[in-house]
Amino acid sequence: MIAVLYAVAMAVLLAYGLNLLWLAVVYARQDRLRPGPVPDPDAVPTPDATWPVVTVQLPLYNEALVVERLIDTCAALVYPRRRLEIQVLDDSTDETTALAARRVRYWKGRGLDIVHIHRTNREGYKAGALQNGLKMARGDLIAIFDADFIPQPDFLQRLVPHFEDPAVGMAQARWGHLNADDSLLTRIQAFGLDAHFAVEQYVRNQAGCFMNFNGTAGMWRRECIEEAGGWHGDTLAEDLDLSYRAQLKGWQFRFLPDIEAPAELPVDLNALRTQQFRWTKGAAETALKMMGRLWRSAQPRRVKFEGTLHLTAHLVFPFLALAAVLHAPLLMLENAGRGPGEVYFAVLGLGLLGFVGFFLATLFAQRALYPNWARRLLFFPLFMAGSMGMALNNTRAIWQALRGKRSAFVRTPKYSETATAKGSWWKTRYANTRIPPVMWFEALLALYCVAGLAAIAVQGEWAAVPFQAFFALAFALVTAYNVRQFWLGRQGA
C-alpha cells in the first residue's frame, strides 16, 4: 500500500512537472531575436478624443496603511480627465473609510471624476464590490488595482491600445515587487510569481490556451464582463472564475509581460498563509465549477488539457505532503528486503523530469527579468523548500473546497513599504503574529522528516538523501519562521 500510494503521488507530481516542462520548452523555442527594430520602451501612445472612457476600480477592505497611497497613485494616472473615472469601492469597517473619503474629497476638488462607494455589508466580498461598482461605472473599459499596487502613470496609456481589437476582452500586466529583497519570505514569493507571469501566463497566452486575470493590475472590456455573466462571489477566486467564463464565451485575453505593475509582497508568514489558502481554495472551487463546462465546450483538446492542469495545479500540495510522509518508510522497507524492487525505483526515477520542468520554468523567468539571473538562481533550493513548506496549509484549503465548505474572503494584510522597510511590520494594527494550529502539524512533520533523513543516511541510501532533506528543510523552514514571528510579536507588544 505504501508503494502504491507513493507511486500515485509521484505520478501526479510528474504530470504537473511535465506540464511546466512543456511550458518551459515552448518558452525557450520562442525566446529568440525578433526581426525589425528594437521597440522603444519609452514610446507611449498619446490619448485622443477617440479613446474610450476608462473606469478604475479600487476594491478596499480595511487598508488604512496603504489606502491614501493607492488613491494618490491612481489619481496621477495619465489619461484625459473627461474620459477617466475612479471608483473607490470601500467595504471597510475601520478608519480606512474616513481616510479614503478624505482623499476622494481632495481629488474631487481638483477636478477628478472620483467617487467613494462604501458598502455596509460584504455581500459577495471582492466580487460583490466590483459588481456593485460596475452597475454605476461609466467606463467602457474597467481597470482594477488592489490596495497594495502602485501602477505607473502611463499604465492606462499602454493598456488601452490593446482593446482596438474588438475580440479582446481582458489584458493583464505583469506584477512587479516593491519589497522582493526585504526577507527570505519575500524572495521566495517573488521567485514563484516571476515564474507564473514570465513563463506560465506568457506561454499559455502565446499558445492560444486559457490564461487568467490575476485579480489586479489588468483591464477588462465592460461588455466582456457582462456577457460572461458578471462577477460571481460563489468562489474565493472570482478572477479565475470570470476568466474561464469569458474565454468560454469566445473572448480573447492578452498577457503583456513588458508592462509591470509593482506591488507589495506579504512580509509575514501568516499573511502569506491567508493568501495561499484563499488562492488554493478558490482555484479548487473554480475547478469544480468550471471543469464540466470546459470539457463540454468546443475548445480544442490541447486547450481543455492545459485548462485542466491550470485549474487543478494546486493539487500538487496534498501529493507533496503524501510523498513527504511515505518517502522514508518506503526506503526503509526496501532496505529490509520488503520493498517493491529495483524496477519500481527505476521507473520512479522519471520523476526527475518533473523537477526539470520546475527548475527550467524558474530559470527562464529569472533570465527574462533580471540581468543577474545566474546569481539569483543560487536561491532556487530555498525557493523550492519554501514552496513545499506550504503543502499542509494548502492541502487543508483543497480539502475544504472538496467538502463544499464555504469560508469568508480573508484579505491579505498590507503594511506599506514604509513599515516593511523599517522592519517593524509586527507593530502595525493589522499584524498577526499568532501561531496557527497548522504550524504544530508542520513542526511534527519536520521532526518526522528529520528522523527519516537520519534513518536513510544510516542505511546508506545516499541517492535519496537530498530529496528527504528538502522535505525536512521545507517544514522546518515554515515552523521556524512562525516561531520567529511569534517572538517578534511578543517583543513588540
Image (cartoon, grey):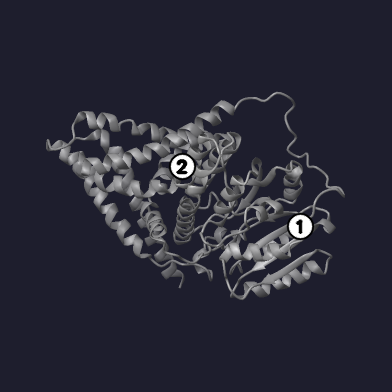
Q: In this rendering, does residue 70 appear at all?
A: yes
Which residue in the structure is indicated by mark 1?
139
Question: Residue 22: x, y in percent?
Answer: 48, 32
Q: Nearer the viewer, residue 252 or 341?
A: 252
Q: Which mark is residue 309?
A: 2
What residue appears at the point 46 percent right and 67 percent down from the top-left corner? Answer: 432
Amino acid type at circle 2 is Leu
Q: Label 1, secondary structure: give it.
A: loop
In this picture, residue 394 sits left or right of residue 327:
right
Q: Which mark is residue 432?
A: none
Residue farthest along the right direction in this orientation: 49
Quarter of the picture holding the C terminus: bottom left
Q: Label 2, secondary structure: give it.
A: helix
Question: Residue 438: x, y in percent?
Answer: 35, 61
Q: Report crowding for label 1: few under 14, some 14 to 19, many 20 or more residues within 10 A (C-alpha).
A: some
What residue appears at the point 80 percent right and 64 percent down from the top-left corner? Answer: 113
Residue farthest along the left direction in this orientation: 337
Q: In this rendering, does residue 371 appear at all?
A: no
Question: Residue 391: x, y in percent?
Answer: 37, 51
Residue 98 vs 306, above or below: the answer is below
Question: Residue 183: x, y in percent?
Answer: 49, 52
**Mark 1 and mark 2: Cα distance apart in space:** 35 Å
Quarter of the picture holding the N terminus: top left
Q: Nearer the viewer, residue 232 or 338?
A: 232
In this picture, residue 307 sits left or right of residue 404:
right
Q: Report crowding for label 2: few under 14, some 14 to 19, many 20 or more residues within 10 A (C-alpha).
A: some
Amino acid type at circle 1 is Gly
